[in-house]
Amino acid sequence: MNRTKILILIAFMIVGLAACNLPGSTAPTPFTFPTPDFTLTAIYSTLDILTVVPPPQTPTLPPAVTATQLAGLPSATPLTPTAPPLPTSTPIPPTNTPVPPTNTPLPTAVPPTNTPVPTQPLIRTAASMVASYLEKEPKIDGDLGEWTLSSYSITKVVYGKEKWDNAADLSAKVMIGWDEANLYLGVYVVDEDYVQNETGLNMYKGDSLEILFDTNLTSDFYVDDLSPDDFQLGISPGSPHVQDDPNAYLWFPTSIDGEPDDIRISGERQEDGYTVEIAIPWSVFEITPQSNKHYGFAFSVSDNDKTGDSVQQTMISNVADRHLTDPTTWGDLKLSR
């Protein structure tokens, strides 16, 4: 408290004492203070403060609130942290599945959920053919009159080009069908002279047909060597004439080479060549056919114009770059349904 306030208090006290002694005033009733006079105590304390240097003050913490002081207050509910309940409509992702951050957009390469990821079949693009599904098996008798399928031209000379004159010398068309039991071929060959003096293993040295069939493109699409799922099958319309002892021979795989059972072959001689109908059980190729599946495939025709001799002079194919021992050069066959 400063000096001015002290002087004001003293003045008030003097005025009060004087008023008690004024005329007409009555003597005050004696009053016993139950406690010390706080005003005088404050004054003298103030005077003491002015003359005594107080000791350095040590800051003290406010007194702790006791249980008695809290007794009158309403009891507060203890705050016990509880985890919010998990939403019942949102499944929790598996522990091992990383969850992308909320603010991180998904990569644009991820297709929409309702859009299937396209699968690209492996296809030999050198030449493609389609085998149509047949509800009724054709009669294997050499007559192509009942065949109404699309035909594919066989005109690419792949061997002995110097011996080939023109399409009248050697050319062909083939139609291909299938069902659960067999692969069917209807073939019309234009050939001025029919010469076949061999059967079985050596039939390629005369007028004959050849089928190259890769049954498993997925496993060896880029393999340029023959594998056990690659087949080389020869068909002879007959020897020495068409329909005289027609037969088939499997050259590859060598583990099962020989004359396969149950292949049906029938041919007819035509003015400009010959026709052949063939039914090949799928067991020959050791597979079960699958609709819309692709297989490696090449169809070829060999020619011999030297009567009384056995020699392969020319070969034509549907694939221009056909190489027997390199399946990557073969064409494609799709079983359509």
Image: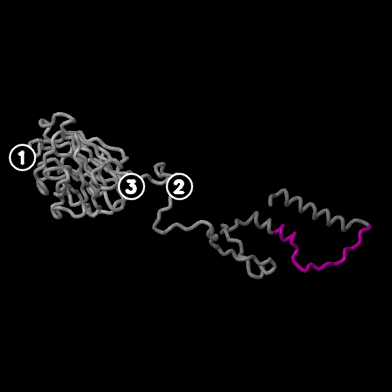
Please, what is the three-letter code of the amino acid marked with disc 1? Asp
Q: Which residue is mark 2?
A: 114
Whether residue 236 is visible to the viewer of this picture, yes or no, is no
Q: Colour mode?
A: one colour
User: Which mark lies nearer to you, 1 or 2?
Assistant: 1
Q: Which residue is mark 1?
A: 309
Q: Which residue is mark 3?
A: 134
Q: Does 37 appear above or below 216?
A: below
Whether residue 176 is visible to the viewer of this picture, yes or no, is yes
Q: Which range is magenta? A: 24-44
Query: Which badge, 1 or 2, comes first in the chain's sequence?
Result: 2
Residue toward you, 86 or 203:
203
Residue drawn at x 92%, y 59% as measured from the top left = 25
Residue toward you, 48 or 206:
206
Residue drawn at x 25%, y 53% as measured from the top left = 287
Residue toward you, 320 or 183:
183
User: Which mark lies nearer to you, 1 or 3?
Assistant: 1
Query: Which badge, 2 or 3, comes first in the chain's sequence?
Result: 2
Helix, strand or loop under label 1: loop
Query: Does the CB distance between marks 2 and 3 fall below 8 Å?
Result: no
Q: Quadrant of residue 33?
A: bottom right
* Residue 85 placement (x, y as % from top left): 54, 61
Please, what is the three-letter code of the amino acid marked with disc 2? Asn
Q: Residues within 10 Å of mark 2 (few under 14, many from 20)?
A: few
